[in-house]
Image (cartoon, grey):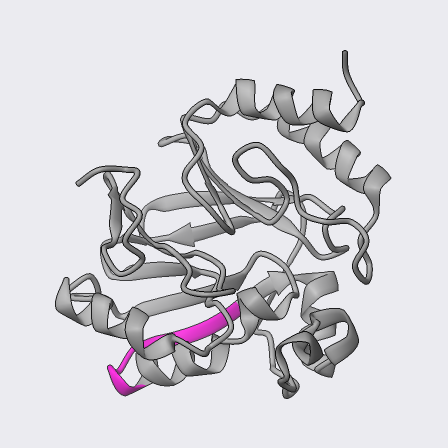
Amino acid sequence: MSLFEVNNMIPIEIPPNTVMLRGVGYDSNIYLFRDGEEGLIVDTGTGVYWHRYFEVFEREDYLRGLRRVIILSTHEHFDHVGGNRRFKEFFERMGLEVSFAAHEVAAEVLEKGDDYVILSYAYGRKFAPQRVDLFIKDKDVLRIGRKELIVLHTPGHTAGSVCIYEPKEKLLFTGDTLFKGSVGRTDLPTGDFKDLVTSLEKLEGIEVDIALPGHGRPILDWKKNLKDIQKYLGVIE
């Protein structure tokens, strides 16, 4: 299957462990990373199109054999967390053990149900307070089966933004920290341009074969893409 498939409901399979579902409408992309009986869902969209994503999971049989799932929010915006409850309910109906993970800053926002920071009002919604099971921070390690994924705190788009790095496959989930050719906005609540610049500098030291952003297509030219963004932002020549 082409890595550049544009049909939202045709999953993009990224060997050996990852499936990408392109976000519908304003939704973030949604990722399933799994190893053995354990899985990691990275972001859940707004929740508006939850049934379409579940149809794909079931049609393609991606969840067979799973017993435990962590739902991880790369940051605290509604287009990434609005579907959290729907996903939890879906997985629990399947008999899976489900837990939520977010950076400790984002987790506090989600547990308060802070609509101003979450931006749920922009979608005509309210975000009910949500319990977060795993308060993660920079350099924490998430174990999914036999795989270890490293948490990288990358504030800038929001104060609670993270990227998730799988070093063996050199795979990086970037959330809205950066995309193909651009970065996440810093003019929204808790955003900070200087923090974003620092986060991009931090990512310079990561060896990446494929970067998977919160919106848009996978990034295959990591170093060039990062350098082009930094040049555009005026932080390097």
Q: Is residue 18 left or right of residue 233?
A: left
Q: Quadrant of residue 3?
A: top left
At x 73%, y 79%, the residue is 115
Q: Which residues are magenta?
A: 93-100
Expressed as whole percent of the image width and height from the top left, the position of residue 173 reads 49, 44
In the figure, 203 relative to 77: above or below?
A: above
Quarter of the picture containing the C terminus is: top right
- The foreground one among 9 and 192 is 9
Q: Is residue 108 visible?
A: no
Q: Is residue 58 left or right of residue 25?
A: left
- The foreground one among 37 and 30 is 30
At x 18%, y 71%, the residue is 58
Q: Is residue 3 visible?
A: yes
In the figure, 2 relative to 188: above or below?
A: above
Residue 96 belongs to magenta span: yes
In the rendered image, the residue lying farthest to the top is 237
Expressed as whole percent of the image width and height from the top left, the position of residue 141 reads 53, 47
Residue 153 belongs to magenta span: no
